[in-house]
Image (cartoon, helix red, strand yellow):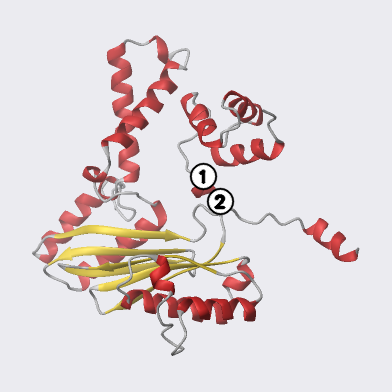
Amino acid sequence: MAITAGAVKELREITGAGMMDCKKALTETDGDMDTAVEYLRKNGQAKAEKKASRIAAEGLCAVAHDGETKAAVVEVNSETDFVAKNETFQSFVAAVAKQAVLTDATDLDSFLAEDFPEEAGKSISEVLVEKVAVIGEKLSIRRFEKVVAEEGFVASYVHAGGKIGVLVDAKAAVINDTVKEAIANLAMQIAALSPKYVTRAEVSQEYIAHEKEILRAQILNDPKESQKPEKVINGIVEGRISKELKEICLLDQVYVKAEDGKQTVAQYLEAVSKEAGSPVSVSRFVRFETGEGLEKKEENFAAEVAAQLG
């Protein structure tokens, strides 16, 4: 099939690989984008980056609390960053977050059908339509998640005015300023370093096996490394997968405020637990980043002006 320049550009943005490598990958995979990403990874020409991490959309993430044990995070999208800074839009997002922490809904459709907290008799969906008419842009309530702490409290952090929203379910018998500060620090770490799991135990064996397959393919496609003995290759694969797990598992990450630059999050929590006189741990976390996985509208200012001038 014919490979378009747009497809090559998209693959290049996803992987960071060279233009000709991207064209070859698409040609070899009949234009299938996901398979082409795998092709480039196996050939060592692309990083293990998800498409979502390279694509942005506008809008806001917001959090709301109901006491110390309940909190929710929502993401509401807009077409432009200008609207995301609009006070009317921001107030709407805050109200949506307020309802999200009170709801028992587990899916978006049910949530949108609920009453809007600040306008009796109207559903969230109906108010959303009204806001679209007032603001003049397409708006979308994309997702929400509620966290209820069973044995501790929920901490939150909002980064860059709403670009990232984080909730942390902390397990702690003792809840004092030291413990609260520690979990707040970890919420900021989650926002900055974007771990995918709390511990290695949460990582599926299917994921690990898939990543090992990618790593082994990279080695076998390397003229020098491919000549090494099988035992050595296995060791390299294990070493690289261990390094990757340290990046995606919160407790294995180096704590960002570590004075020695080596202390892991797990070790930091051990120190906090000792100071508090009671175990402190992270049960789970939620991290929303505005626009994850959404295509951002490409703006062509020159073409827009030309069109307006007729």
Tell me where residue 95 appears, x and y as whole percent: 44, 80
Q: Quadrant of the N terminus?
A: top right
Residue 11: image quadrant is: top right
- What label does residue 178 carry, if any? none
Callout 2 crowding tier (Cα within 10 Å): few <14, some 14–19, many ≥20: some
Marks 1 and 2 close (CB-CB < 8 Å):
yes
Element under label 1?
A: helix
Residue at 37%, 74% in the rendered image: 100
**Farthest residue toward the right?**
310
Quarter of the image with the C terminus is bottom right
> Which residue is denoted by mark 2 in the rendering?
55
Instruction: Report the residue at 63% width, 79% height from top.
Output: 133
Q: Disc 1 versus disc 2: distance between alpha carbons?
A: 7 Å
Measuring from the top left, give residue 108's x and y in whole percent: 41, 66
Q: Position of residue 274 (x, y in %)?
A: 11, 59
> Element at badge 2?
loop
Residue 72 relative to residue 112: left or right: left
Q: Which residue is mark 1?
A: 51
Residue drawn at 20 percent across, 50 percent down: 267
Q: Residue at x 49, y 61 (%)?
A: 290
Q: Is residue 182 left or right of residue 10?
A: left
The residue most toward the left is 277
Classify residue 138 by image quadrant: bottom right
- The one nearer the camera, 196 or 74, is 74
Q: Residue 227 or 274: which is nearer the viewer?
A: 227
Q: In the displayed structure, does residue 104 sit left or right of residue 39? A: left
Amino acid type shown at disc 1: Lys
Amino acid residing under circle 2: Ile
Q: Residue furthest bottom?
A: 120
